[in-house]
């Protein structure tokens, strides 16, 4: 039953990550607006007059570029699937081997998931799931490369 549940959650994640245009989910995090388009046009023009562009606008465009990148999408995909695996492991510990072998109706499994869900939102400094994500080699590499490319101005 848990294997089926795990596969179902992964399928939902795959659908979410591939909905609409590439990385459409980024629009939920950083709205696309006219100021951002002004900054993109500014950055391609070679001009040095930043009068119409604020640092915040520049930061928003740069953040959108990172979040829209294929590399970040890959890191999110790996991270979400790893956390789902850890959640399934927690559920296995809660239920015990006997329940897993005999099967469990989905209606009894969902409340267990609901009980575990608040753990995902705990204080980041003490969050086991955040630590799991931090320890993923692809995540470490992504952020190492990202910060290595970040200008220090």
Image (cartoon, rainbow, N blue to C red):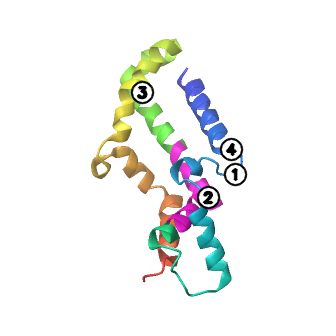
Q: Which of marks 2 and 1 is nearer the N terminus?
A: 1
Q: Which residue in the structure is indicated by mark 1?
A: 22
Q: Which of marks 3 and 1 is nearer the N terminus?
A: 1
Q: Nearer the viewer, mark 3 or mark 1?
A: 1
Q: Which of marks 3 and 4 is in front?
A: 4
Q: In this view of the protein, which residue sits in the foreground, 80 or 137?
A: 80
Expressed as whole percent of the image width and height from the top left, the position of residue 5 reads: 56, 25
Q: Earlier in the sequence, mark 4 or mark 2?
A: 4
Q: Which residue in the structure is indicated by mark 4?
A: 18
Q: What element carries label 1?
A: loop
Q: Which of marks 3 and 4 is nearer the N terminus?
A: 4
Residue 115 in the figure: left or right of residue 81: left
Q: Which residue in the structure is indicated by mark 3?
A: 91
* Numbered label tally: 4
Residue at mark 4 to residue at mark 2: CA–CA distance: 12 Å
Up-down relation of residue 10 to residue 32 (above or below): above
The residues colored magenta run: 60-80
Up-down relation of residue 42 to residue 66 (above or below): below
Q: Can residue 103 be seen in this view?
A: no
Expressed as whole percent of the image width and height from the top left, the position of residue 80 reads: 52, 44
Q: What element carries label 3?
A: helix
């Amino acid at each position: 039953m848990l294997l089926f549940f795990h596969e179902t959650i992964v399928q939902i994640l795959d659908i979410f990550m591939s909905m609409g245009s590439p990385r459409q989910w980024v629009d939920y995090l950083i709205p696309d607006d006219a100021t951002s388009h002004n900054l993109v046009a500014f950055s391609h023009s070679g001009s040095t007059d930043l009068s119409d562009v604020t640092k915040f606008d520049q930061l928003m465009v740069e953040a959108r570029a990172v979040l829209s990148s294929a590399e970040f999408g890959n890191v999110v995909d790996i991270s979400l699937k790893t956390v789902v695996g850890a959640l399934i492991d927690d559920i296995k510990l809660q239920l015990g081997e006997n329940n897993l072998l005999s099967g469990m109706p989905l209606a009894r499994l969902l409340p267990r998931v609901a009980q575990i869900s608040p753990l995902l939102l705990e204080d980041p400094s003490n969050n086991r799931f955040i630590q799991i994500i931090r320890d993923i080699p692809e995540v470490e590499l992504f952020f190492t490369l990202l910060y290595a490319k970040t200008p220090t101005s």
